[in-house]
Amino acid sequence: MAKQNELELENSQLKVYLEAKEIELNHANSLLNEFHSFLLVLGSLLDHQTSVVCPEPKIPTHSTVENLDDSQLKSVLPFILNLSNDPSLQRTCASLLSLICSLPICNPLPISEILERILQNLYSTDIQCSLNSIKSINHLIQHFGTTNDTDLDCKLSPFFNSILNHLWDCFVRIDFELVEMKVYILKTIMQLIKRSSLNHLITINQFYYIVIDYTKSIQHISQPSHLQHHLIIQSHLNELVGSILKFDETLLDRSDHVDYLMYMLVEQFSQAHDLLTQLNLDDDHSNVVLNSHQVNYHQLIDKLIINVLKVLGKVSMVIGSSFHKYMDSILPLLITMINTCKNDKAIILILKTIGDFVLYAGGPVNPYHVQLLVNAIDIKLNNLDIEKELRIACLKAKSFVIS
């Protein structure tokens, strides 16, 4: 009897063992089928290339990816994410992710897994891989913004802090020479902030001071050869500051924070004026650096001036009469720039900004500054070649200030 019981126990254990092995075999077959499906789809993506590991795989076109349905994308995506661990395929996989994220079909895909890989690829030593990751983030921001372009969709909102921090870290980390990539990151951050909600208010407030501190830290150009890149980055940083202030005007509630911001803007404007003065000198006496490259420095400085003016205008509008204490430091610079700057658009904005200062700050304007402004405007008006739009702006500004 005992022997029969022992035999039944062994049979029972053998049955359990065989059932477990059958489950493992079924699972293995399932994985093989999925892998086979993946190879078929990936083959079409890579234009039927037989070798997956190659120095420069052919990047699929948008039309190729658009032909895949939801199920195909869902089956391919995990393998693409896994293949990203292979350094030789990292660039190709980053491109594939960027293409997938650019399609509306990406909405049902697992955002957390995609973002995790994208954010990792930001730090790749392969610049193209990092660039494709920034493009992917851009696409996701576009897809998950609402129709009125204000709030991020709930699927992307939980990752807001992580995306913002990783993008800024990448921006600070890469060299100044990669100026186009740095600008692209700043534009992506601006899109992210534009579509954020009040849920992200604290994060954006903290980020504002990080941006201000960084902008202040690069005020002085250590290497003249970096002047071109410096002007471009500085200009876009001011644009970023303006977009943050547009999102949350309460950042200007504290006078000490406004003082810090105004000091930075005045210093930037002063540097821009000095550079324009050098450019306007005779070529024989100009700064060698400014003439040694085929770079339109006038255009770069004009853009910087315009972005500084936009922030100044925003500050004066928000703080109102409190702006009056900054008038003596900023007005002389703006008035001098009227005849230093050669860009009509920038001059018109200078005149408009001065009008905003007077309008929002209220109170009396220093008579000396009024006379300086009238003299500067008269010099412009005495130029017979002045464009009609600029002439009208000069006449309006003169009439407004005198009255």
Image: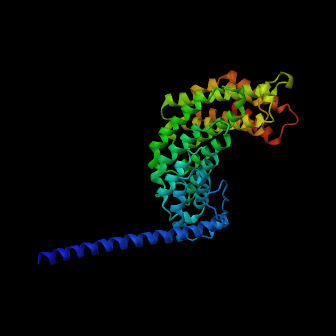
Q: How many numbered tags mark residues here? A: 0
* Residue 55 seen from this side: yes
Looking at the image, which residue sits at the far left?
1
Q: Is residue 379 above or below residue 5?
A: above
Q: Nearer the viewer, residue 125 or 355?
A: 125
Looking at the image, which residue sits at the far front?
3
- Residue under the image location 35 percent in, 71 percent down: 21
Task: Find residue 294 and report its image quarter.
Answer: top right
- Residue under the image location 52 percent in, 71 percent down: 71
Residue 116 % position (x, y): 49, 52
Residue 389 % position (x, y): 79, 42
Q: Nearer the viewer, residue 286 or 196?
A: 286
| Picture quarter with the C terminus | top right
Q: Nearer the viewer, residue 291 or 384?
A: 291
- Residue under the image location 59 percent in, 41 percent down: 240
Q: Is residue 306 above or below residue 275?
A: below
| Picture quarter with the N terminus | bottom left
* Residue 144 seen from this side: no
Residue 239 % position (x, y): 62, 41
Residue 329 left/right relative to 381: left
